[in-house]
Image (tube, rainbow, N blue to C red):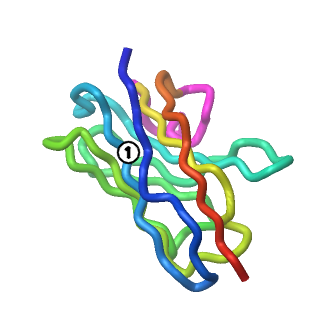
Amino acid sequence: QMQLVESGGGLVQAGGSLRLSCAASERTSSYAMGWFRQAPGKEREFVAAINWSGGSTSYADSVKGRFTISRDNAKNTVYLEMNSLNAEDTAVYYCAAGFISGSYLEIALAYDYWGQGTQVTVSS
């Protein structure tokens, strides 16, 4: 059972940046990796995903141009660089892994493993 541990969350002012990391307990080179977030009272939503090789990425419209997902398979780690943060980005951010590709990258139910989440709070 793969374990995923997120880190890097915290409190940041609007316009600031954060870098989230997700470390896996085993090799991730065969898995697509995704980031999702859930704000209070809202459904979990897709943020960004990257395929197994890192050659293909996908982003929610709300974060395009501000967030960048990347991975280092040698370290079994995926990252989410978040810039120009605003109050609407406040949420718990979750990392996920799955044997998926294409349009499934944006579907939470398609992922096999999930981390516990890390809180991101943006103050305005």
Find residue 3 and report its image quarter: top left
- Magenta stretch holds residue 107: yes
Image quadrant occupied by the C terminus: bottom right
Relative to the observer, which residue lies in front, 69 or 16? Answer: 16
- For the magenta stretch, what is the residue range? 99-110
The overriding secondary structure of the stretch rendered in magenta is helix
Find residue 98 and report its image quarter: top left
Residue drawn at (48%, 22%) of the image? 112
Instruction: Name the outermost residue toward the left.
Output: 74
Image position of 95 (left or right of 69): right
Residue where numbered disc 1 is placed: 22
Mark 1, Cα crowd under 10 Å, few <14 / some 14-19 / many 20+, is many
Relative to the observer, which residue lies in front, 53 or 68? Answer: 68
Q: Position of residue 16 (x, y in %)?
A: 53, 82
Image position of 88 (left or right of 108): right
In what element is the residue under mark 1? strand
